[in-house]
Amino acid sequence: MFSHHHATMAPGQAPNKRARKTTAALFKGHTIDVARRLIGATLERRIPRGEPDAGTLVRGRIVETEAYLPLVDPSCHAYRGRTKRNAVMFGDPGRAYVYFIYGSHYCLNVTTERPGTGAAVLIRAVEPIAGVAAMRRRRLAGVPDHRLASGPGNLCRAFSIDRRCDGKDLRSGEMRIIAASKQRPIVKAAKRVGLSVAQDWPLRFYDAGSRSVSKTPAP
DNA sequence: AGCAAGATTAGC
DNA sequence: CTAATCTTGCTA
């Protein structure tokens, strides 16, 4: 079916040195920089076997993120130390940290900072690029294309992301993030959503020109 | 073992 | 504005 020279290369991965290098650099540096840099990057996922649309490549352009800072941020899941749930936050950067919330939703994060330091960036919304039909099948009827993966829970639903994805390396494989190759969009900052502490910290970043940015609750 | 809270969402 | 829904982590 696929003929790759390297066994670790995932189907659909560009065998391009420059692209790989840029992608590796995506997760380096401070959490806030990573959060900004992720705007305009591509989230890509291959729908797992045994599910509807298995094998389909689903893709979206990241348009909204939130930074959860190391050490000083009381709203960061790592703030009160390492637990079973947040363990991957304390591991290597560039991994998926996926958690379950409110009894029904998953949220996808990218781990940041060096091993031993817990921090992450929440991916809040992507603009669908490919696999729109597969996304739609997972979502409620009547949702317009541009809102299929808008909001962290909706995004995970559309991309079939759940706790099985926790700890996965996002640089390659069936779920990965590819750095934006061309120009970066205008990135604006705002308060993070849904918090009870550190509510005013301007650590939410979004593409001001995208319709796929999530609708935020009124202040 | 029991319990309260939660990085959300859809529906009224 | 609020109910839904259940895992996690903390306390006893």
Image (spheres, coloured by chain):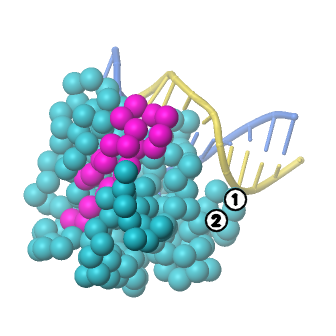
Chain colours: A cyan, B blue, C yellow
| Left or right of residue A191, residue A110 in this image | right
Q: Residues within 10 Å of mark 1 (few under 14, many from 20)?
A: few
Give the residue number, with chain letter if any, for mark 2: A87
When asked about the image quadrant of residue A202, the answer is bottom left
For badge 1, the amino acid type reads Lys
Disc marking residue A84: 1
Is A111 placed above or below A103 here? below
Does the segment drawn in magenta span residue A7?
no
| 1 and 2 marks in contact (CB < 8 Å) | yes
Magenta includes A54?
Answer: yes
* Vertical position of residue A137 compared to residue A9: above or below: above
Looking at the image, residue A106 sits to the left or right of residue A180; the answer is right
Frontmost residue, A60 versus A19: A19
Q: Chain of mark 2?
A: A
Q: Determine if residue A171 is in view.
A: no
CA–CA distance in space, label 1 to label 2: 5 Å
Mark 1 belongs to chain = A
Circle number at residue A49: none
Please, what secondary structure does the residue beneath circle 2 have? helix
Which span is picked out in magenta?
A40-60
Q: Position of residue A170 (x, y in %)?
A: 43, 65
Q: Residue at x 25, y 82 (%)?
A: A18
